[in-house]
Image (tube, helix red, strand yellow):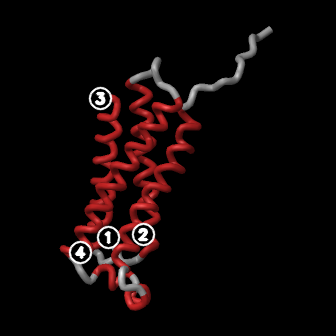
Amino acid sequence: MKQYALPIRFGIATSGCLIAYFLILSLFSLHTNIFYSLFNGLITGFGIYEAIKYFRLKDQEGFRYGSGFTAGLVTGFVATMVFTLFFTFYSTEVNPLFLKDVSAVWFKNYGSFEAIVFFTVAIMGFATTLVLTLAFMQLFKASNNIKKKSV
């Protein structure tokens, strides 16, 4: 459990940034525009990148691809789960009309629109986490190339 402490902290911090960004957008009534959710990927990516970077600095000699990959996944999954819980609470308790405002067409056609939206938010977060973790680990992994000696 000790090895997951740093990624969990970064995941909670990342989810705090995601929540703050969402609430700032809601102050300006921009949270119903789906375009602004693209910035969530940048926030999540930065959190994962920093978690892997600090995880590597903390354990330089024992750092392996698998441990860095795990740190990135844990960070992103924690951030996604916390943000999804917040998003669910916000759209059901704080602003019940939020989902109707997001997509009036979907709301008319699907009786379980809320479940679809919550599921989509979670899946998008998990997919972003997986892709960004794989990408960032290419930066942090040890090279397997043989070093050439200068002649």
Residue under label 4, please give it: 92
Position of residue 60 in the picture relative to residue 32 (left or right): right
Q: Give the answer, above or below, for where 56 lies relative to 9.
A: above
Say whether disc 3 or disc 4 marks the residue closer to the N-terminus: 3
Residue at left 39%, top 32%?
54
> Which of 57/81 is in front?
81
Q: Give the mark toward the camera: 2 or 3.
A: 3
Badge 3 amino acid: Lys
Q: Residues within 10 Å of mark 1 (few under 14, many from 20)?
A: some
Residue under label 2, please give it: 36
Residue under label 1, please give it: 25
Question: At numbered mark 1, what does the secondary structure look like: helix, strand or loop?
Answer: helix
Question: At numbered mark 4, what does the secondary structure look like: helix, strand or loop?
Answer: helix
Residues at marks 2 and 3 touching, judged by CB atoms closer than 8 Å: no
Question: At numbered mark 2, what does the secondary structure look like: helix, strand or loop?
Answer: helix
Residue at left 33%, top 34%?
4
What's the CA distance linking mark 2 and mark 4?
Answer: 21 Å
Say whether disc 1 or disc 4 marks the residue closer to the N-terminus: 1
